[in-house]
Image (tube, helix red, strand yellow):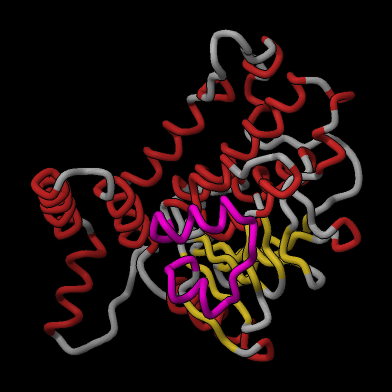
Amino acid sequence: MASATGLRAFLAKGPGWLRRSPWAPLAAGLCSRGPTWAGQPEPGPRPTSVRQRDGIRHIVLSNPKNRNALSLATLKFLQSDLLREAESTDLRVIIISAEGSVFSSGHDLKELMDGQGQDYHAEVFQTCCEVMMLIQNHPVPVIAMVNGLATAAGCQLVASCDIAVASNKSSFATPGVNIGLFCSTPGVALGRAVPRKVALEMLFTGEPISAQEALLHGLLSKVVPEEQLEEETMRIARKIASLSRPVVSLGKATFYKQLPQDLRTAYYLTSQTMVDNVAMQDGQEGIKAFIQKRKPTWSH
């Protein structure tokens, strides 16, 4: 399938895909971690927890004492949690949520002090970018379930997910400018999720927006009362999990592939995909089931 091929191509790039400018190259060690690059975390306490049932994988940021900061360790665990058996047909959808009142405060600023060194800082931002792109390249939909504050790279994580459901108490910000660290990498995901002028106001002022504002501007898919958040997120996840995984995976990969194309190219690509989709086992099964007025029986 296109999505599986895309994921393999993404992984094959290894950690050297991201190059800094010639005057500040990555350390050789960061570009030669071999097969362990893909999210292999260091031994120690887990800042995430994972469970999976009925095709739905729950990844929970579980370090509320540190405001679920996206430390390098957390990013590596998150990467590993996303990659684990990613192409298994038992996996249909992923939900990313968090413990506590803060979804994620973004990078751990203690890791960005001078003492860590530039090479370490490069690894932090590179790993974060890999995680965000992995979400888009993943063969199954990834849903953010947000109940609280999401700032900086935490807001980036929400913006990077395919679907985002939040409680009405949630808020979102890219406040790095206030401490002299412009949210340049969060701006990549944010600028692709909301209109340019909204993104730039958030980036230039660092001021938060409410869940309702985030919904209005396209950062969120839905806003619900806090007590309905899990129920609504699970409703969406169960619906996706009930569908054909190959069809959903093909659709996701094609959607992102056509987005940056001009109109003619986008229609050409998607027309070819429709032809491929019709030829799939589940494509034919769905058409026959509709005509025969019965429920389809998917292959996966």
Residue 32 image-quadrant placement: top right
Residue 35 in picture, x, y percent from top left:
63, 24
Taking the image as shown, residue 73 lies to the left or right of residue 81, namely right
Query: Horizontally, is 120 left or right of 229 in the view?
Result: right
The residue depicted at 53 percent of the width and 24 percent of the height is 18
Which residue is at 54% across, 15% downward?
A: 21
Q: What residue sits 71% from the left and 68% below the top?
A: 149
Relative to residue 111, is residue 202 depicted above or below? below
Q: Magenta segment, principal secondary structure? A: helix
Q: Which of 92 and 284 is in front in this view?
A: 92
Question: In this picture, is 180 found above or below 54?
Answer: above
Residue drawn 51% across and 75% down? 213
Residue 51 coordinates in the image, percent (x, y): 71, 64
Q: Does the magenta stretch include residue 240?
A: no
| Place of residue 251 in the rendered image (x, y in percent of width and height, measured from the top left) | 30, 58
Whether 90 is drawn above or below 88: the answer is: below
Indicate whether residue 202 is drawn in magenta: yes
Along the line of sight, the residue nearer the viewer: 128 or 141: 128
Locate the C terminus and report the quarter of the image it occupies.
bottom left
Q: What stretch is highlighted in magenta?
A: 193-219
On screen, residue 271 versus residue 170, left or right, reads: left
